[in-house]
Amino acid sequence: MQIDWNTFSPGASLAGGALIGLAAALLVLLNGRIAGISGILAGLLEPRPRETGWRLMFLLGLLLAPALYIACATLPPIRIEASHAQIALAGLIVGIGTRYGAGCTSGHGVCGLSRFSPRSAVATACFMATGFASVYLLRHVLGA
């Protein structure tokens, strides 16, 4: 593995991570909710009084943030070495996994670990191990 020094951006990465942490902390402190994206989206599918507005705004922010970034800066070129079908299948598998894992990487990895949740530590370790194994199998065993 090599680092592409032309697009390496530790400052932007640090700022992005700090903003994610700040947003997660503010949501917990001001709203008493965990910033797990799958849980926020699932809450829209089963609406409750006074729960829809903030969930919609949170998801809208996730969709508008890249557009705002593009308006202010140039994105590096994006190269995805997968077909649309592979991407859709991967998304479906991730969606199923978030239901079985009772949350996603943002809920467990960002919010759960910061609260020292043992369940989130196990879930995050499983996410990471599965990701490592998938990449190894696809790239080195199957040669895809």
Image (cartoon, grey):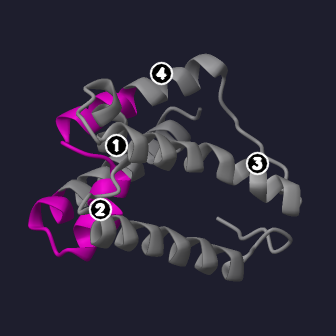
Q: Is residue 35 visible?
A: yes
The quadrant of the rendering that contains the N terminus is: bottom right
Marker disc for residue 31: 2
Label 4 sits on residue: 89
Q: What element carries label 2?
A: helix
| Contact flag, marks 3 and 2 (Cβ < 8 Å) | no
Dominant SS type (magenta): helix
Q: Which of 144 and 53 is in front in this view?
A: 53
The answer to which quarter of the image holds residue 42 is top left
Tell me which residue sits at (62%, 78%) in the image: 15
Tell me which residue sits at (34%, 43%) in the image: 40
Of circles 1 and 4, which is in front?
1
Q: Can residue 128 be seen in this view?
A: no
The quadrant of the rendering that contains the C terminus is: top right
| Cα gap from disc 3 to disc 1, whole angstroms | 21 Å
Of circles 3 and 2, which is in front?
2
The residues colored magenta run 93-122
The three-letter code of the residue at mark 4 reads Leu
Label 1 sits on residue: 40
Q: What element carries label 4?
A: helix
Of circles 4 and 3, which is in front?
3
The three-letter code of the residue at mark 2 reads Asn
The three-letter code of the residue at mark 3 reads Ala
| Cα gap from disc 2 to disc 4, whole angstroms | 34 Å
**Mark 2 or mark 4, which has the lower sequence index?**
2
| Cα gap from disc 1 to disc 4, whole angstroms | 22 Å
